[in-house]
Amino acid sequence: MNTGRIAKLERTVAAQERTIAVLADSVEKGFAQTSDLSVMVRMSGLEQIVALRTRELATQKEALERTVNELRQTQSQLLQAQKLEAIGQLAAGIAHEINTPMQYIGDNARFLEKAFVELLAVNALFDPSALPADRQRKLARLHERVPRAIESTCEGVDAVSKIVRAMKEFSHPGTGERSLFDLNHSVTSTVAVSRNEWKYAAGLEIDLSTALPSVLGLQSEINQALLNILVNAAHAVAEAHPPTDAVLMGRIWIRTWREGENVCVSIRDNGTGIPEAIRTRIFDPFFTTKPVGKGSGQGLAIAHSIVVDKHGGTIDARSDATPGSPTRGTEFQITIPIKRAGTQKLRRI
């Protein structure tokens, strides 16, 4: 539907350009055909009319071009939304398929843990000195290693289950209705589902307030905003700190706290920082400094729309892009009203 409308507007712009060309050509021909004074006077009046009409057509052309650009942006956003929805449905199916076998593995690992403890108790009733020396050494190694192996298996199962739960939450489209949710839980889910983006580039530290109240809003969309900013931070850190150098490995800090009638979350990194020349444009749709194929310029724009337009919150972007500076990096601070009181304006720092 948008494609047809764009094509129609483009045809209108082309027709106006042809009209301008015809009017200008008629004036030039009039001047070339005669030099009579009365004709010159009439042609002068015609020239003024043509100039006025040309300005009007130029204004209409600019307005139509703006409309075409807006429609193209809307079309791109719709395509992106459809793509995300398809990916979400696929992720939900994968998460469900992973969850069932992981439950089996977890239950079996915990059973083996209890069974091995009982076997150790039975084994303690026998004197191992009657066994050959090599058997005694193997038995001692089993006593030491089996509990550690079972423990690490249980930890791995718990980690996978946590990631699966986060995937299911992110892939859920939501009801579109506001509800109370825990911002801390949104942060932990975001960290889990984005682990592959930051774990090779940055160490991550989380400081979550234990006195954070529930927020009335759209949890799935807040999750998306947090994810976009966290992935952006991971990319900035990876660019500033080679992932092969563990000593110079980057850092990302996430913190939550309450501030009056708002809840706040800060995502800070020691990455490349944002140059001052482009700092005011970072929330503009389709603006990106990444090479082709690395970014669409939609991440921060979507985060801004979710926080500011849909939740009446604010986003503050503080950054230092000076190479070698101890404060080099970027901090995004999101503030969300506990109960939405209206749309607030974005503050850029």
Image (spheres, grey):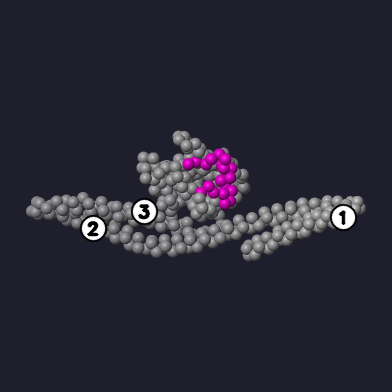
Q: Which residue is mark 1?
A: 34
Between discs 2 and 1, the one toward the N terminus? 1
Q: Residue furthest right?
A: 38
Q: Is residue 45 visible?
A: no
Q: Nearer the viewer, mark 2 or mark 1?
A: 1
The amino acid beneath tag 2 is: Ala
Q: Which residue is mark 2?
A: 115
Residue 88 lies left or right of residue 142; in this view the side is right
Q: Is residue 289 magenta?
A: yes
How much space separates mark 2 and mark 3, taking CA atoms?
23 Å
- In the image, residue 130 lies at what x, y percent? 8, 53
Q: Which residue is mark 3?
A: 159
Residue 82 lies left or right of residue 192; in this view the side is right
Going 48% across and 61% down the picture, which residue do you hit? 87
Q: Nearer the viewer, residue 276 or 21?
A: 21
Image quadrant in which you'd find residue 15: bottom right
Magenta-drawn segment: 272-290
Q: Residues within 10 Å of mark 2 (few under 14, many from 20)?
A: few
Q: Secondary structure at mark 2?
A: helix
Q: Nearer the viewer, residue 122 or 324?
A: 324
Q: Residues within 10 Å of mark 3 (few under 14, many from 20)?
A: few
